[in-house]
Amino acid sequence: MAKLIILSKDKVLKEVELKKTIVIGREKGDIILKNPAVSGRHMKIEKIGFRFIAHDLDSTNGTYVNDNQIKTKELRSGDVITIGRFQLKFENPDEEPDTVDTLDESGDVGGMTMMMDSAKIKAMMEKAGKQNAKSEAPTEGSPHVAAKLFLYQSSGAPKVVTLDKDTTLIGSSDNSDIQIKGITIGRIAASITKSSDKYDISYQGGMAKLKVDNKPMDKHRLSNGDKFSIGSYNFEFRTEL
């Protein structure tokens, strides 16, 4: 089972098994770290199957993984999270091993840029939306309908994914929520984090960089109609048709 080893000044203070999603903070959470540099609710570690995603909760002093400040990052066994004066070593014996993806990226469904007029795009979106209506129906009492992500294919209607999870992972791993293949695609290439009605996309890894409107980005707050790509895969973010 995955666990956190909590250290301060190289001294082990406690080991915590990660059986569920947890919140870490100075005042509130599943793990309380008493230090002025730690925010009241500092960070969250989200458990998704055998995957664990670290989220900074807009802390004052930031969350660092292996000395790099992060907002959202999938944890790998051996990673060290730094919060204030504390180090939290992450260990996961059930972690999926790294593999080398040998697929040729010429097989990517998003391999060609399509020039299409807006009426045709809207018609394709409406058709795709109807095809996915059952799986994408909003939950009764929901304050708003989750945004949708359109993955354009070389022919036919785009693939539609409803962004109703707190974190949606895009990459070549079999455990990705949206799986895309290619030798340049990272196991987790990008993540989309949902907070209320806000959606942020972050680059996570791989030779294929995240590009928004053809500009490389580490992080971007998505707005209706934003287009982004990872390698030769083309996406469009929509909150409305």
Image (cartoon, rainbow, N blue to C red):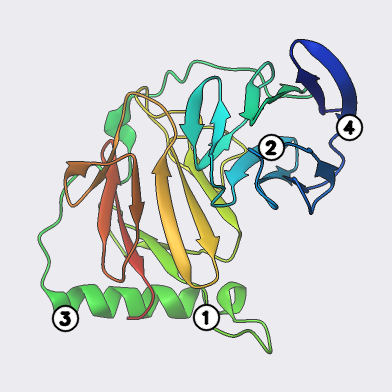
| Residue 22 vertical placement versus 7 (above, below) | below
Kind of residue at disc 4: Glu
Q: Pointer 1: what residue?
A: 145
Of callouts 3 and 2, the N-terminal one: 2
Q: Pointer 3: what residue?
A: 119
Disc 3 residue crowd, few under 14, some 14–19, many 20+, Cα 10 Å: few
62 vs 230, nearest the viewer: 62
In the image, taking residue 86 as reference, residue 187 lies left or right, namely: left
Of callouts 4 and 2, the N-terminal one: 4
Kind of residue at disc 3: Ala
SS at badge 4: strand
Q: Which residue is depicted at the point 85% across and 15% down?
A: 12
Q: Pointer 4: what residue?
A: 17
x and y, in percent, of residue 127 in the image: 37, 78
The image's mark for residue 52 is 2
Report the Cα–Cα distance between label 3 and label 2. 41 Å
Q: Nearer the viewer, mark 1 or mark 3?
A: 1
